[in-house]
């Protein structure tokens, strides 16, 4: 699937510069006046009437061309948002779920385009799984060789990502609709969270840092981990150290995990208990 953020900017979208627009208008007026036999050499003075008029007309041109840019951008999936995005994806029969973000809706639109076959490539089943509930944050679909078993790993948008039995049931029911599945396909729907890892840290604080800073590290790590694309993401000790170094934390030693925690592409790691001990103060 195409990463929309990596696409180059469409040529139709202009880079606008007010001073350039004003200079072009000034040059145009000068040429017209000179052609009519009028000398013109004071337009650069802001106090001149004609300069004031050009300021106004240049500003209006800037606004009009900005509006054209906005209208052009709204026709591209990468730039469309909110109601404009709803209209853009509607032609393919894709509708926004309640509470669904623009980013998630764009992904479903791309999947719907790729997987338009009634019984899929994997993208077809991914689209169906995401459409089953807005609580499906991410999904991975794969089969082993020519097996009729279609594995579906579901990452929940709730909590640590571990999909509940209720959510897995919704996804499986959506996949098993007659107009969705291929006759021979059998679905194995599971949570993508296959393991939970505890984190143990020892932190050194700056001499003037409050002791309560220790308590801010665990929720900060959880929040930053939740922002990642968790499917297939290894838990790297270097990420833990770098992320846990809040302002005022001068050093971190990691006791657990002791090394890189690797996962397969359809797996995700949930963070378990995060404990941080004060290891002293220093610069």
Image (tube, helix red, strand yellow):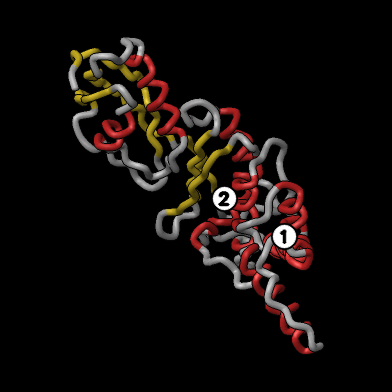
Q: Position of residue 191 (x, y in %)?
A: 47, 35
Is disc 2 placed on a helix, strand or loop?
A: helix
Q: Does residue 148 appear in the picture of this structure?
A: yes
Q: Position of residue 126 (x, y in %)?
A: 57, 50
- The residue wearing badge 2 is 126
> What residue sits 62% from the left and 69% below the top?
20
Q: Is residue 24 above or below residue 64?
A: below
Q: To which quarter of the image does residue 145 belong? A: bottom left
Is disc 1 placed on a helix, strand or loop?
A: loop
Number of numbered discs visible in the structure rendering = 2
Q: Position of residue 148 (x, y in %)?
A: 50, 54
Question: Is 252 in front, or is 206?
Answer: 206
Q: To which quarter of the image does residue 192 belong? A: top left
Question: Is 129 in front, or is 85?
Answer: 85
Q: Is residue 55 above or below residue 129?
A: below
Q: Is residue 206 above or below residue 103?
A: above
Residue 32 image label: none
Q: Earlier in the sequence, mark 1 or mark 2?
A: 1
Distance between the Cα atoms at labels 1 and 2? 63 Å
> What residue sits 30% from the left and 28% below the top?
245
> What residue sits 67% from the left and 74% below the top?
24
Q: Does residue 21 appear in the picture of this structure?
A: no
Question: Is 19 in front, or is 137?
Answer: 19
- The residue wearing badge 1 is 47
In contact (CB < 8 Å): disc 1 and disc 2: no
Q: Residues within 10 Å of mark 2 (few under 14, many from 20)?
A: many
> What residue sits 60% from the left and 28% below the top?
166
Which image quarter holds the C terminus?
top left
Question: Is 199 in front, or is 276?
Answer: 276
Q: Position of residue 64 (x, y in %)?
A: 77, 63
**Residue lying farthest to the top in this orientation:** 211
* Residue 13 horizontal side relative to residue 251, left or right: right
């Amino acid at each position: 699937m195409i990463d929309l953020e990596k696409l180059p900017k469409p040529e139709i979208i202009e880079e606008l510069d007010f001073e350039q627009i004003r200079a072009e208008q000034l040059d145009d007026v000068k040429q017209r006046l000179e052609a009519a036999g009028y000398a013109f050499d004071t337009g650069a003075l802001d106090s001149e009437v004609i300069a004031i008029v050009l300021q106004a007309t240049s500003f209006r041109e800037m606004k009009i061309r900005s509006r054209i840019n906005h209208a052009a951008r709204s026709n591209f999936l990468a730039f469309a948002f909110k109601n404009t995005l709803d209209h853009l994806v509607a032609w393919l029969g894709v509708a926004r779920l309640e509470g669904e973000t623009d980013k998630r809706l764009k992904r479903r639109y791309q999947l719907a385009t790729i997987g338009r076959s009634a019984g899929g490539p994997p993208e077809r089943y991914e689209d169906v799984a995401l459409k089953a509930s807005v609580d499906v944050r991410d999904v991975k679909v794969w089969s082993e060789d020519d097996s009729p078993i279609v594995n579906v790993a579901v990452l929940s948008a709730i909590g640590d990502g571990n999909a509940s039995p209720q959510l897995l049931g919704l996804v499986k029911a959506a996949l098993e609709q007659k107009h969705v599945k291929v006759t021979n396909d059998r679905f194995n729907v599971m949570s993508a969270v296959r393991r939970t890892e505890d984190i143990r840290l020892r932190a050194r604080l700056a001499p003037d840092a409050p002791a309560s800073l220790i308590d801010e590290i665990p929720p900060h790590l959880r929040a930053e981990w939740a922002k990642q694309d968790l499917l297939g993401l290894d838990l790297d000790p270097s990420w833990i150290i770098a992320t846990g170094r809040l302002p005022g934390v001068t050093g971190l030693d990691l006791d657990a995990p002791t090394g890189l925690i690797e996962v397969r592409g359809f797996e995700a790691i949930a963070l378990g208990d995060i404990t941080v001990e004060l290891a002293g103060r220093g610069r």
